[in-house]
Image (cartoon, coloured by chain):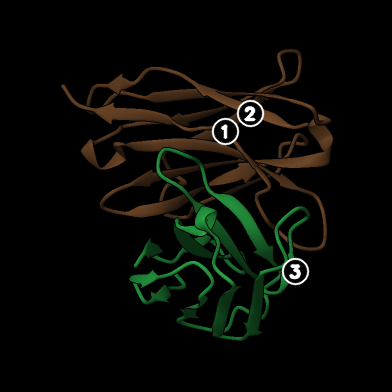
Chain colours: A brown, B green
Amino acid sequence: QMHLQESGPGLVKPSETLSLTCNFSGDSIDESFWTWLRQSPGKGLEWIGYFYYSGSTNYNVHLKSRVTMSLDTSKNEFSLRLTSVTAADTATYYCARLPKGEWEMLDYWGPGIVVTVSS
Amino acid sequence: DIQMTQSPSSLSASVGDRVIITCRSSQSIKSFLNWYQQKPGQAPKVLIYGASILYRGVPSRFSGSGSGTDFTLTISGLQPEDFATYYCLQTYSNPRTFGQGTKVEMK
């Protein structure tokens, strides 16, 4: 059974960098694309992007200049870094799995972590 | 960006009802559409992908149809556990975009 869990600070100051980690179990790292999304009352659900263990990435074009995703295979973790945050980045952040296959879909999600951007 | 527009934004229904939710994209996305269900305090769960393919374990009362720009999610025989918010997601182009959601409430 696949399991994902987000972790990281719940409060980030404006202009600083948001760093989140997703720990996963139950899957081989190279069988899936690892995805980040977020949800806020104002913007709804928003796709941030995904990456593959080979280093291939697909970031939201509107966030691309501020986003970096990475993987730590030794810890079964993948990470999100979002730089120069503002109040508009306040949201619940989710990690999710996108399994390789003919059709793209997100079949396993973490429970989400609330991140607030405020001084 | 491809804009996804769901209708209605909310609806009231009773157990046993047939519920239809529509999703329209601002340009053709072929069949690259998912449907998700989200309950309060929980992450979304996939119901349908490829516009009409039922994800394993999802009850058969859920069905999806459509291609191009117009899609529907149908719940045939609403159950108490189906009261939730439903979202469509296009996976055709970057950025992937969600509809604004349809909240299904108890009448």
A66 left or right, relative to A104:
left
Residue at image point 50% right, 37% down: A94
Secondary structure of residue under mark 3:
strand
Residue at image point 74% right, 65% down: B54
Does A97 sit above or below residue A105?
above
Secondary structure of residue under mark 2:
strand
What's the CA distance linking mark 2 and mark 3? 24 Å
Q: Which residue is mark 3?
A: B53
What's the CA distance linking mark 1 and mark 2? 5 Å
Residue at image point 55% right, 47% down: A49
Residue at image point 68% right, 28% down: A3
Split into 4 quadrants, where in the image is the N terminus of chain A? top right
Instruction: Determine which of the numbered discs, if any, sits on residue A30 in the image.
Output: none
Residue A73 found in image quarter: top right
Does A1 sit above or below residue B103?
above
Looking at this rendering, what residue extends furthest in the left direction?
A119
Tell me the kind of residue under disc 2: Leu
Tell me the kind of residue under disc 3: Ile
Considering depth in this image, is A116 or B34 the residue closer to the camera?
B34
Q: Position of residue B105 (x, y in %)?
A: 37, 62
Residue B104 found in image quarter: bottom left
Is the Cβ of the residue at disc 1 closer than 8 Å to that at disc 2? yes
Is the Cβ of the residue at disc 2 closer than 8 Å to that at disc 3? no
Asked if marks 1 and 3 fall on the same chain, the answer is: no
Q: Which residue is mark 2?
A: A4
Q: Residues within 10 Å of mark 1 (few under 14, many from 20)?
A: many
